[in-house]
Amino acid sequence: MPVITEAAERMKIAIASGKGGTGKTFVSTNLFWVASQKGIDCALADCDAEEPNVAEFIAGEEEQVDEVYQQVPVIDPEKCSFCGKCYEYCSYNAILYLPEKRMIQVLPDLCHDCGACSYACQAGAITEHPKLLGRVTRAVYGAAQHLVEGRAEVGVYTPVPVITHTIHEASDRKLVLLDSPPGISCSFIATVDRADYVVLVTEPTPFGLHDLMLSAATVRQLGKPFGVVINRAGLGNDEMYQWLKGEEIPLLLEIPFDREIARIYAEGGLPAAVDDSYREMFSSLLIQIVQQKIL
């Protein structure tokens, strides 16, 4: 216990996967439950803002809800001189500019709220208006534990600002578990890039290996230390194990392909909370990960 609490001082662990359905939320919720039972000052942040589901398995008492906004510029054609400076300054091609037709318009779904167009405009034709991107809910789970959920509005082009705020709200805890969005898109990178260690959850199938290769390459490019958890071990073949050995990637844990796990999880339960063997399994995994900070 002292080893965990000392090493976990201000440590962020991202639990991620190359594709959906491998069991990353299963791992993150069981890790959080084990940490909370040990009395660790920790938080679990659901960064899968487009499809958050941690609350289906662990619920806390709601403490606060923050709304996340983006400032979207609007151009007044009556004041606009059609000089094209805002168009030139925009790095995201978010401004439609047709000078021959005296037409100029901001495309909100491409705007990144950088403010460059407002800075460039000398005519005072640009004003910024708030657009709701999503909400971040913080809940108290125990004496020193918090649950933080990011939930993006339907149709928002990117949940990254919501994810960033979600991680910020969880960062006052000593140990922060980040339940990452799947895949290797901007959402995945925005989460993993803020972690001290990354756990990649996969399954021993051809699809699982293919997506693990992509996510492992991305995490390596970000310069993050990482290890792998194989879920549903016993399914598929040994190609996954051969690849991990050849790449010298640490195998942190194998979770068996067990019908009982599926039953507990389908009922909204956590195996670590009802089975001593799984409690010990996830406790050992947590110790393994946290000790990476000492090594």
Image (cartoon, grey):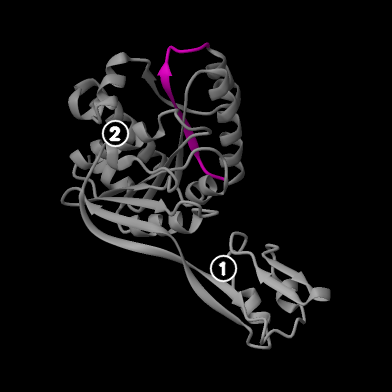
Amino acid type, residue under disc 1 in the picture? Asp
The secondary element bearing badge 2 is classed as helix
Picture quadrant of residue 74: bottom right
In magenta segment, residue 229: yes
Residue extent of the magenta highlight: 223-237
Between 226 and 6, the one lying in front of the other is 226
Quadrant housing the N terminus = top left
In the picture shown, does residue 81 fall above or below 258? below
For marks 2 and 1, the one nearer the N-term is 2
Left or right: residue 151 versus residue 280 is right
| Front residue of this view, candidates 67 and 108 | 108
Residue 176: x and y in percent read 34, 49
Q: Dot 1, crowdedness within 10 Å: few (<14), some or many (≥20)?
A: some
Instruction: Tell me whether circle 2 and circle 1 mark residues in contact (CB < 8 Å).
Output: no
Crowding at mark 2 (Cα within 10 Å: few <14, some 14-19, many 20+): many
- Confirm whether the magenta stretch covers residue 8: no
Left or right of residue 186, residue 2 in this image: left
Figure quadrant of the C terminus: top left
Q: Which residue is mark 1?
A: 113
Give residue 30's mark. 2
- Which residue is at the far right? 100
Q: Is residue 171 left or right of residue 276?
A: right
The residue shown at (44%, 54%) is 153
**Front disc: 2 or 1:** 1
Q: Residue sitting at 59 percent across and 70 percent down?
A: 114
